[in-house]
Amino acid sequence: MSEALRIARERNLDLIQVTEKVEPPVCKIMDYGKYLYRLEKKERQTRLKSSGEIKGIRLGFNISLHDLEIRANQAEKFLRKGQKIKIEMILRGREKTHGDFAKEKIKQFLEILERKIPTKIERELKREPRGFTIIISKK
């Protein structure tokens, strides 16, 4: 143990005890700061994967049926990867007075998407200052 401690000090590294259950104790010579950084980085990556990345799809007020289908194809790819989707419809100027028309467009998009892949609603359709948003995921 004292020899390992001497070697670690010569190399300006730390002596880290891996397990204490065995005799003699198992130790590693490494930079403890780098070790903590790697653990934190790994934890951050697993947190991102577990929460599921939210992808955004924006629909315009006067979007055509063909464009809705193209966006639905893109949304299908995201859902198959296990990601959640935030569908946004940004309303500008006088479009804000036609909220019912905007809701119909979003429902039309969801129907097209439902034919391709079954979905569930994570957060209901919500009116926001700039338009409407809804969050969906794969069933």
Image (spheres, rainbow, N blue to C red):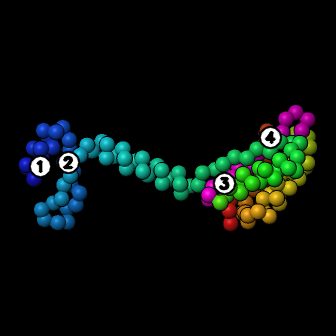
Q: Position of residue 115 (x, y in %)?
A: 80, 64
Earlier residue among tags 2 and 4: 2
**Residue 111 in sight in this render:** yes
Look at mark 2 in the image and give the residue it sits on: 29
Between 108 and 36, the one lying in front of the other is: 108
Look at mark 1 in the image and give the residue it sits on: 4
**Residue 136 in sight in this render:** no
Label 1 close to label 2 by CB (< 8 Å): yes
Label 2 close to label 4 by CB (< 8 Å): no
* Residue 12 badge: none
Look at mark 3 in the image and give the residue it sits on: 78
Label 1 close to label 3 by CB (< 8 Å): no
Between the residue at mark 1 and the residue at mark 2, the CA separation in whole angstroms equals: 8 Å
Residue at 27 percent of width and 44 percent of height: 32
Amino acid type assigned to the residue bearing label 2 in the image:
Ile
Q: What is the secondary structure assignment of the residue under circle 4?
A: strand
Q: Residues within 10 Å of mark 4 (few under 14, many from 20)?
A: some
Between the residue at mark 4 and the residue at mark 1, the CA separation in whole angstroms equals: 64 Å
Residue at 15 percent of width and 43 percent of height: 8
Range of the magenta residues? 81-95
Earlier residue among tags 2 and 3: 2
Between 47 and 11, the one lying in front of the other is: 11
Q: What is the secondary structure assignment of the residue under circle 1?
A: helix
Please identify, in this view, whether the residue under mark 1 or under mark 3 is nearer the observer: 3
The image shows residue 54, relative to residue 11, as above or below, that is below
